[in-house]
Amino acid sequence: DTGVSQNPRHKITKRGQNVTFRCDPISEHNRLYWYRQTLGQGPEFLTYFQNEAQLEKSRLLSDRFSAERPKGSFSTLEIQRTEQGDSAMYLCASSSLAGGNNEQFFGPGTRLTVL
Amino acid sequence: GNSVTQMEGPVTLSEEAFLTINCTYTATGYPSLFWYVQYPGEGLQLLLKATKADDKGSNKGFEATYRKETTSFHLEKGSVQVSDSAVYFCARTFTGGGNKLTFGTGTQLKVEL
């Protein structure tokens, strides 16, 4: 297993367009997290899944954002009607509940630029 | 709340100098504490962690001790190398489960020869 992967690595879009990002977690990791990181800031929590269930969403996640993890493996994050303020790095992380280990493994991120 | 405050950068040091990056957290609940590192062009990597008061996390010569009395988790290294140049993030788990993380703003470290 090569770790958490995210696609695409970069996305440039025009304001008002929809975009979708994909995250493939480490195999058999039952928790999957999405974070957003803007320039000069630390990552901010957006939402997380345990298996296929979305257990929590941050207030940062407006109704233009939707995330899914239909089979408890990969996840997608969709942003509808993008705005310039959505420009950021979107990070995915996964973790295993086994053994009480709470370490999250991060992917390389998808950098979104909204023009 | 669930916030983390860390010293602003950039921090510029000469090779073999002593490093301290300060981090304090809000005393809500019983969080686990972490230091993550982001090397240029790479994703976040866990550097070290501590899950309860007085625990010391250590890795690659870096250390941090979970200090409940001062709500601190300062990162230290006795002798930095050029290869340690990166952005360092302090983080804590949110209160309320799920092990969600809240991060500080990051501290950029530059180590020069």
Image: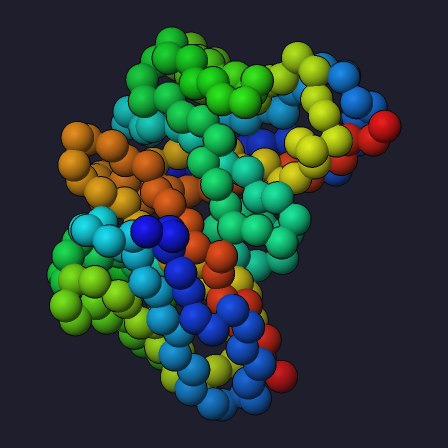
Point 51% across, 25% down: residue:
B24
Q: In the displayed structure, would residue B86 be above or below residue B19? A: below
Point 62% across, 54% down: residue:
B41
Percent position of residue A72, x then y: 16, 62
Point 22% across, 43% down: residue:
A96
Point 46% across, 14% down: residue:
B65
Q: In the displayed structure, would residue A12 be above or below residue B34? A: below
Can residue A58 be seen by looking at this rendering?
A: no
Q: Is residue A54 left or right of residue A110?
A: left
Q: In the displayed structure, would residue A27 be above or below residue B30? A: below
The residue positioned farthest toward the right in the image shown:
B113
Can residue A22 be seen by looking at this rendering?
A: yes
Q: Is residue B5 left or right of residue B99?
A: right
| Quadrant (top left, top right, bottom left, bottom right) of the C terminus of chain A | bottom right
Percent position of residue B7, x then y: 64, 31
> Front-most of B96 and A32?
A32
Residue A39 falls in image quadrant: bottom right
> Front-most of A65 and A11?
A11
> Front-most of A110 and B1?
A110
Percent position of residue A83, x then y: 52, 80
- Count of all numbered marks drawn on residues in the image: 0
Residue B53 falls in image quadrant: top left
- What colouring style does the render use? rainbow
Percent position of residue B44, x then y: 50, 46
Residue B22 falls in image quadrant: top right
> Front-most of B33 and A76?
A76
